Image (cartoon, rainbow, N blue to C red):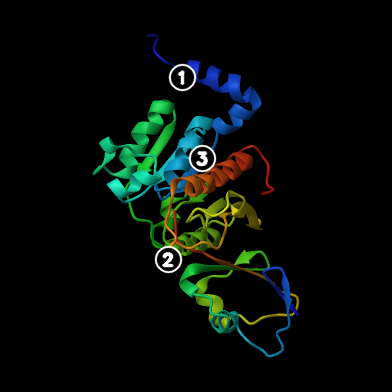
Amino acid sequence: MVTINGKNVDITVLTTIGNYLDENKFRRQRIAVELNGEILPKPAYDTTFFNDGDKIEIVSFVGGG
Amino acid sequence: MHKITKEYIQEALIERHGEAIQKKLNNGYVAIAGLGGLGSNVAFMLARLGVGHLHIIDFDKVDLTNLNRQQYLISHIGIYKTKALKEQLLQINPYLDITADCIKVTNDNIKILFANDDIICEAFDNAEAKSMLVNGILEYFPKKKLVCASGMAGYGSSNSIHTRKVGRNFYICGDEITDISKNQCLMAPRATLCAAHEANIIARLLLGEETA
C-alpha cells in the first residue's frame, strides 16, 4: 500500500513511478513529484520503484499567470 | 516638498506594520520569476510591505494585451518588464535593493540565478515552465522556500483559490484546476487574487509562520 496525493493506493505488481504516471495520463513536462518529502528528479521516474508505505505527492501544473 | 529619506519611509512602514515585523520584512530576500499577471502584482505587494531585497526576473517586454491584468501602463509598452517594474517599485520605495535580471530562466541557469535568494516565487504563465522551475529549485535548493501558482484563469469563484503546503518548503497557490487552454481567459481579479495568495504566504514565511 502506498499513499498518492493523500489517497491509499494498492500497488500489487512491481512497477516504477514512471509507469504509474503514464498509466494515469500525467504529462511529465507539467508535473512535480515528491517522494516521501523529497523531490524526485524527472530522470529518476523510470528507475524508481514503489516501496510499501511510500508517500507520493504529484503536483500537476496548469497554465496561466 | 521635503526629500523622502530612507528614515522617513522606515518610520512610515513601522507606523503601519510595527517595528518587529518591519525589521523582518526589511531583511527578506525574495526572487520573483516571471513578471506578468502574477509576478508584477506580487512585486507591488512585496514592495509595499518593504521587503528589503527583491530579485525580479523576466525576458519579455510589455505589450498592450498585458494591461488587462498586469501592473503596467500605456507608457510602458515596448519596454522590458524588468525595467518598467523596477521603475514603479522604486516609486513606492526608492530604498529597496532591487536586482533585475532580463533573462529567460532555464534548467541550466537556475543554480546561478537563485543562489542568493531565500524565497523563490514562481510566477510564470506556462505550465511546462512552472514544472521546470519547481523541479529545479526543489532539486538544487531543497532548503529554500518555494511558492508557486497554478490555476487562476477565468472568472470562477474567488473562494476556489487557496494556498496549500505541498512539501516541507513548497507551497502552491491557485485553484490547481482551471487551465488557460480550456477556453478560459486570464483576467485581472483572479490573477490578482492568486498573486495576493503568493504575496501573503511569502510575508508569512518572512515573519516565521510556516503553515499555509
In the picture, measured across the screen, residue A42 lies left or right of residue B83, that is right
Estimate the x, y position of residue B134 in percent, counting from the top left: 51, 60
Residue to which mark 3 is pinned: B29
Label 1: state its secondary structure.
helix
Chain containing the residue with disc 2: B
Q: Residue furthest left?
A: B78
Q: Is residue A48 above or below residue B180?
A: below
Residue to which mark 1 is pinned: B6
Residue B169 seen: no
| Identity, as a three-letter code, of the amino acid under mark 3 | Tyr
In the picture, measured across the screen, residue B137 lies left or right of residue B73, that is right
Chain containing the residue with disc 3: B
Q: Earlier in the sequence, mark 2 or mark 3?
A: 3
Label 3: state its secondary structure.
strand
Whether pointer 2 and pointer 3 mark residues with C-beta atoms closer than 8 Å, the reply is no
Mark in front: 2 vs 1:
2
* Mark 2 vs mark 3, CA separation in Å: 34 Å
Residue under disc 1 on the same chain as residue under disc 3: yes
Classify 10 Å Cα crowding around label 2: few (below 14), some (14-19), many (20 and above).
few
At x 59%, y 39%, the residue is B203
| Identity, as a three-letter code, of the amino acid under mark 1 | Lys
Residue to which mark 2 is pinned: B181
At x 54%, y 37%, the residue is B28
* Mark 1 vs mark 3, CA separation in Å: 18 Å
Label 2: state its secondary structure.
loop
Estimate the x, y position of residue B117 in percent, counting from the top left: 50, 45
